[in-house]
Amino acid sequence: MKSYDFIVVGSGIAGLSFALRASRHGSVAILTKKEAENTNTSWAQGGIACVQSPEDSFDRHVADTLDAGAGLCPEDVVRTIVSEGPEVIDELIRWGVEFDRRENGDGESELDLGREGGHTKRRILHSKDTTGREIETKLLAAVRAAENIDLFERHFAIDLITTAKLGFASSLRCVGLYALNEDSGEVLTLRSDRVILCTGGSGRVYLYTTNPKVATGDGVAMAWRAGAAIANMEFVQFHPTCLYHHEEKSFLITEAMRGEGAKLVDKDGRDFVTAYDERGSLAPRDIVARAIDREIKKTGSPCVFLDITHQPKEFIAERFPNIYETCLRLGIDAATDPIPVVPAAHYQCGGVRTDVNGATSIAGLWAVGEVACTGLHGANRLASNSLLEGAVVSRRALADILETLPLGKATERLLLPEWESGDVTDVDELVVIYHNWDEIRRLMWDYVSIVRTSKRLQRAATRLQNLRREVQEFYWNFRVTPELLELRNLVEVATLIVDCAARRQESRGLHYTLDYPEIDDQNWLIDTVLSRF
């Protein structure tokens, strides 16, 4: 058993920034199931939303967030996170993050702020179209150079260890976790009174997603099994513009392109989004994704197009170099050709229910970033608020931990039991695991995607119930592997999404059902909360 003052699961902006701050106070372990840079943060293109201009204000950013969230964002949470944004931006810059700047006309430079859908002002800090990679690279370099931090790459967190799991009658508390060393097959027992989940989202539960392969909902599934409350999993954001090409099935075309004037058009060049919302291509993502979905179904076309050909080639190549080069390699010159796009699962707005400090319903357990549901995103996330939330709430979480569970405070010395594999064997037929994985993702895409019905949700629930039994049987009869653990988490998260969606009998934000097409503020201006205990 290894003991640490803090255990962080995940190595994106939330996990790394928390670890850097926490390492000044005690020992930190960071667990990440693949290489540390393999995170959702690394894939973020657009940027991080933060008020930086005298033409902007916290009130405007708050109002835009509340508008996008369709009534479910607690204003106090939104205001807290938005108003603390400038402080964490300064902190990121001190850690070496370089955001794009431009000449201001007085011989000096200023931050080059972008604009995205739902924002009424330019407030998106970016580094070309690879902002997440810039943040990830600089934070990871700082972590590798820091003292007091042990980075466990290729270590898959299996389950949280709680007092309930240990058979204690005392109140529910998290005291550590088990983690699989993917290279040796050994399962480690890690002990801490302060466990912080920063595992990202669950985009891989869907057949088509902009997310990396690691996004399998591990944190939500672990927290649910441990007894934590889960909220608003029905609100899955589908990004309107994922590149439609057989060679690049998960390549995101950033919303910042629409902020620079790109329009969504059909095969004839018609700007169809204005028929659904007067803001056109700059409407919030839920509206734009549904407009594209309807257009594709109405016309039978496989995709729509994003047209930025009005901008000079030099501007496109300079502002969006990653997108421009990727498209060019595939035979699409964005300077002359509209880019074929389709919606794809992108962001999990629900998650482990927390307060604005990341504290969950289980003592000793915090959750920060996409894995968590603070309420900031409500029923639909405003573009580029996610990196902001990860940076701000990780900072608040440390302050909360140091106040409520300070280091040096006497706690019982627990000797956690070692992992017991029991009488299990190696998985003999991986094809069964891959088949179940594929079935989950296909049924979620067919029955629980942009447009839903009660009948589709019921069909999904019935099949997922059977799949859960099959997966549990695998889990108990075979030695754990990364593939089996991901499948176990995927079926758990898929079930939570379906259960939340079935409960909400209205259409709000990202949850749209043909059986209840209207917003029902009288009965459903509330979170959908699930709890095992």
Image: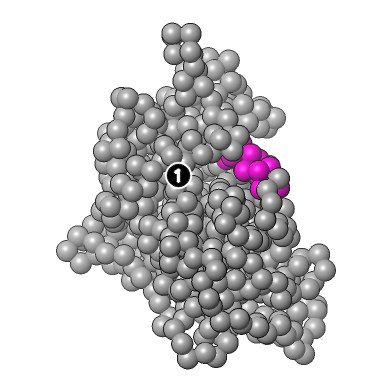
Q: Residue at x 59, y 52 (%)?
A: 24
Q: Quadrant of residue 64?
A: top left
- Which residue bears the numbered disc 1? 388
What percent of the width, then of the height, locates residue 382?
A: 38, 44
Which residue is at the front of the view, 479 or 386?
Answer: 386
Q: Is residue 393 left or right of residue 159?
A: left
Element class at badge 1:
helix
Q: Farthest top residue? A: 106
| Stretch of the chain drawn in magenta | 131-144
What percent of the width, then of the height, locates residue 208?
A: 56, 52
Q: Residue at x 64, y 61 (%)?
A: 27
Task: Describe the colour scheme in one phrase.
Answer: one colour
Q: Quadrant of residue 118?
A: top left
Q: Farthest right residue? A: 184
Above or below 299: residue 171: below
Do we see residue 99 in this rendering?
Answer: yes
Alpha-carbon neighbours of circle 1 within 10 Å: few (<14), some, or many (≥20)?
A: many
Q: Residue at x 28, y 67 (%)?
A: 505
Quadrant in which the N terminus appears: bottom right
Which residue is at the front of the view, 253 or 244?
Answer: 253
Give the mark count.
1
